[in-house]
Image (tube, rainbow, N blue to C red):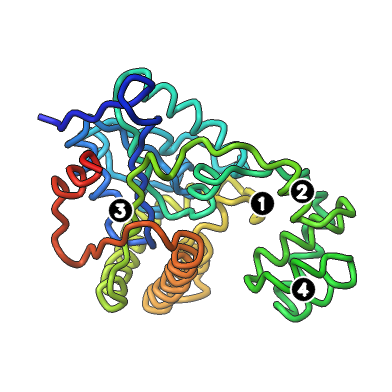
Amino acid sequence: MGISFETGPNSGHGKRAILIAGPTASGKSALAIELAKRVDGVVVNADSMQLYEDLRLVSARPSIEEETEVPHRLYGVLPSSEAFSTGAWLRRMSAELETIWSAGQVPVLVGGTGLYFKALTEGFAELPEIPDAVREQARLLADAEGVPALKEALVAAGDEQAAETLNDPQRLARALEVILATGQPLTRWQKEQQSSPVLQAADCLCLVLAPPRNWLHERIAKRSKLMLSEDGIREVKVLLAQKLSYKLPAMRAIGVKEIGAFLTGKQDNVETEYRLIVATRQYAKRQETWFRNQMPDWQRLDPSREIDADAVVVDFLTE
């Protein structure tokens, strides 16, 4: 029997939710299912790659068996040919949340895409469409010359604030795209277009899984072996057969390039597994940096130790 978890205008609380972030391979999905069982919850996807229908194993989506334990939403709902923005995800998530609350259930949002959580709890600025040529210009500069060149280009284009405050190459490239395409700095767009938050962090149980590095690396190694299994290779083969642009998000998922090189004979199984491990570790490190910098007030849990799901939920309900 689940614990009573009332939401809405008559409950004494705002619209409540459980939010679970964490690096890849940290056990987020398993925890989400355990918490959802206790609060009559619905697990909702907050991971950009798990949106795509072709990548269940490669993106570590919940298995079919796991999805039968509690309701799951927004998993595998997009074709790989579609590019899905944060704004589009936020609109779809907002509709899902209203449906879940209307049914008297609790949304349990889980994923590794930090920007999704930030947009939900802090608001989101819908930025203009960027012409492909401008985006390509910024990305090529990032790939070829890195952070110093991006900062120099931003200063030359008139966005000194972004050059001074940003250090991540992807965010610098995004700022450069915006000012080159629109003539306006990214911060001005964000200030003028910022929407109201869909969720108030004070009304939510906000969790970040923060595992020890060695423990996480062991799980990443196991996941890499699984990605190179017969089913993982089949997923990538089916995706590549669609001959999609490598600019699409689904085609940039970890595993697609690496297993694609294995399928074409450019590298053997051992080299492919090594490259999968390295790419996944690097991604996990970027995620951890984001969570540390952007979510400093979220509660940290160590998944290498047994997490008392009942205690986690009860503490939230009694706040």
In the rendered image, residue 187, in percent from the top left (x then y), is placed at 74, 55
- Residues 300 and 12: in front is 12
The quarter in which the N terminus is drawn is top left
Is residue 176 placed above or below 71 in the rendered structure? Answer: below
Q: Which residue is mark 3?
A: 28
Q: Residue at x 31, y 74 (%)?
A: 217
Residue type at the position of mark 2: Trp
Whole-number angstrom distance, CA of label 2 to CA of label 4: 19 Å
Q: Which residue is mark 4?
A: 150
The mark closer to the camera, 3 or 2, is: 2
Helix or strand or loop: what does disc 1 sit on? loop
Q: Which residue is mark 2?
A: 189
Q: Which residue is mark 1?
A: 245
Residue type at the position of mark 4: Leu
Whole-number angstrom distance, CA of label 1 to CA of label 2: 29 Å
Helix or strand or loop: what does disc 4 sit on? helix
Residue type at the position of mark 3: Lys
In the rendered image, residue 307, in percent from the top left (x then y), is placed at 16, 57
Q: Residues within 10 Å of mark 4 (few under 14, many from 20)?
A: many
In the rendered image, residue 62, in percent from the top left (x then y), is placed at 31, 45
In the rendered image, residue 293, in percent from the top left (x then y), is placed at 50, 66
Q: Earlier in the sequence, mark 1 or mark 3?
A: 3
Q: Earlier in the sequence, mark 3 or mark 2?
A: 3
Left or right: where 36 falls relative to 169: left
Helix or strand or loop: what does disc 3 sit on? helix
